[in-house]
Amino acid sequence: MERILIVEDDLDIAELVELNLVRKGFEVIKASNGVEGLETALRTIPNLIILDVMMPGKDGFSVFKELRRDARTASIPVLFLTARAQLDDKIFGLELGADDYVTKPFSPKELILRVQAILKRNQNKPGEVRITCGPLVFDKNALKFYIDSEPVDLTNTEFKLLLYLVEREGRTQDRNELLRSVWGYSDEVHSRTLDTHMKRLRQKLGIYSGMIETVRGIGYRFMLPPQN
């Protein structure tokens, strides 16, 4: 049974989400503020966290950053569930590395579908778990990434996005297909954050940044440099 942590200071909303998750067979644990949410996440290591943004004491964005800094929780997928519905807030949450961003009021049915989609995307797939492509190495089990044998810190989303491109080396990937495969959705918010993630990936690739090519009007392509 997969365990979901709900970090939400509105008791009615927390109970509504819990009810719908339990009906789908999930184990649910709850925390009513950011500090308690962090402590609960570290103690229980859930499969996914549903995280409010506006909470007393410590807001959801701050909680998310602390989750990502701790090795025990760095790879746990996070879905923001919040009343902060401004486009800039959505983009900020996704650019932090969140797996999804749902605004209140919300459809419980849609929320559950998004939770299920995130968990499905984060399942370890059978087969090779260590992928090597030129100077790049991906450890799919540990979600670790290396360049020339040196570890490089990638967010979960950056890891999935770069791996998706590498596994399709030499083939142009349409923007909408990248959005659907990595985020599960194709919309204005995710489209804008796709470009931000590509910019950050190029920065982290350093001297190998040119391996991510922009194909104007279509999307992106990963290409290894020619061998000397």
Image (spheres, helix red, strand yellow):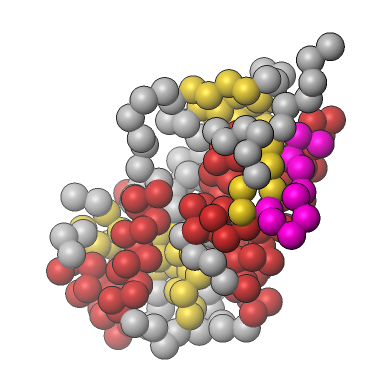
The one of 43 and 3 positioned closer to us in this rendering: 3
The one of 226 and 160 positioned closer to us in this rendering: 226
Q: Is 188 on the left or on the right of 29, as rendered?
A: right
Q: Is residue 68 visible?
A: no
Q: Is 66 on the left or on the right of 79, as rendered?
A: right
Q: Does 203 appear above or below 187?
A: above
Q: Does 35 appear above or below 174?
A: below
Q: Is 157 on the left or on the right of 172, as rendered?
A: left
The residue that appears at 36% across and 58% down in the rendered structure is 117
Q: Quadrant of residue 205?
A: top right
Q: Is residue 157 visible?
A: yes
The residue that appears at 81% across and 36% down in the rendered structure is 210
Q: Does 75 appear above or below 64?
A: above
Count of residue discs: 0
Q: Is residue 85 shown in magenta? A: no
Q: Is residue 217 shown in magenta? A: yes
- Residue 134 image offset from top left, x and y in percent: 68, 20
The one of 13 and 187 positioned closer to us in this rendering: 187
Q: Does 7 appear above or below 219?
A: below
The residue that appears at 46% across and 41% down in the rendered structure is 72
The residue that appears at 68% across and 77% down in the rendered structure is 88
- Residue 184 image offset from top left, x and y in percent: 46, 60
- Residue 198 image offset from top left, x and y in percent: 71, 50
The one of 3 and 181 positioned closer to us in this rendering: 181
- Residue 114 image offset from top left, x and y in percent: 37, 65
Q: Which residues are magenta?
A: 210-219
Can you name the residue that lies furthest to the bottom here? 105
Question: Quick one: quadrant of the C terminus?
Answer: top right
